[in-house]
Image (tube, helix red, strand yellow):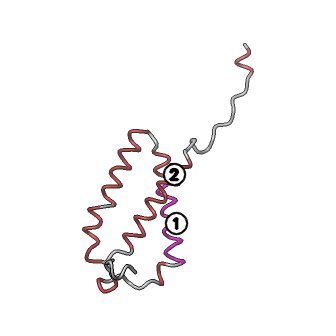
Amino acid sequence: MMAALTRRGARPILPSVDVLTVATLTVVFAGLTVAMLRTVRNRRRRVLYLIPIIVALIAIRWASYRQTWAELGLSLAAAAVVCVIWWFAYGRRLPKPTDDTIRVWTKDDPF
C-alpha cells in the first residue's frame, strides 16, 4: 500500500555520463581532426589510413564493450564544436600546408 503512494523521481534528460571519459575522447578526436586539416593534401589518404581510422575502430569497439555510446556521441559532438571554433578563430588564417614548410629535427638544428 505504501509503495503506491510514493512518488517517482523525475528521470534525467541525459543518462549519467563519465565526464573524464568525454573530455579525453574530445581532446583525442579534436586533435585528430586538426591534424587531418593541417596535413599536406596529397599525403592525407596515407595519414587517414594510419591514424584516424584505427582510432575510430578502437573507439567503436571500446564503446561497444563498455556500452558507453552516450559518451562516444557526446565527445564526437564536442570535438566537432571545438574544431569549428578553432577553424573560424585560427585555422582559416593559416597558409595551406605544403612540403616546403616541413622541417626535420637534427642534432645541429633542433628548431
* Residue 14 covered by magenta stretch: no
Badge 1 local density, few (<14 within 10 Å), some, or many (20+)? Answer: some
Q: Give the overall secondary structure of the magenta segment.
A: helix
Instruction: Name the image quarter holding the C terminus.
Output: bottom left
The range drawn in magenta is 75-89
Residue at left 49%, top 61%?
A: 79
Q: Position of residue 55 (x, y in %)?
A: 35, 55
Instruction: Name the image quarter holding the N terminus.
Output: top right
Q: Is residue 31 above or below residue 22?
A: below
Disc 2 target residue: 22
What amino acid is labelled 1 in the image?
Answer: Val
Q: Out of 45 and 50, give the one closest to the viewer.
A: 50
Q: Position of residue 35 (x, y in %)?
A: 39, 69
Label count reads 2
Q: Out of 51 and 78, give the one closest to the viewer.
A: 51
Residue at left 54%, top 71%?
A: 85
Q: Out of 90 and 13, give the one closest to the viewer.
A: 90
What amino acid is labelled 2 in the image?
Answer: Val
* Residue 85 covered by magenta stretch: yes
Left or right: where 46 falls relative to 12: left
SS for callout 2? helix
Q: Position of residue 19 (x, y in %)?
A: 56, 49
Disc 1 target residue: 82
* Residue 24: mark in rendering: none
Residue at left 46%, top 57%?
A: 76
From this viewpoint, which residue is outermost toward the front?
A: 108
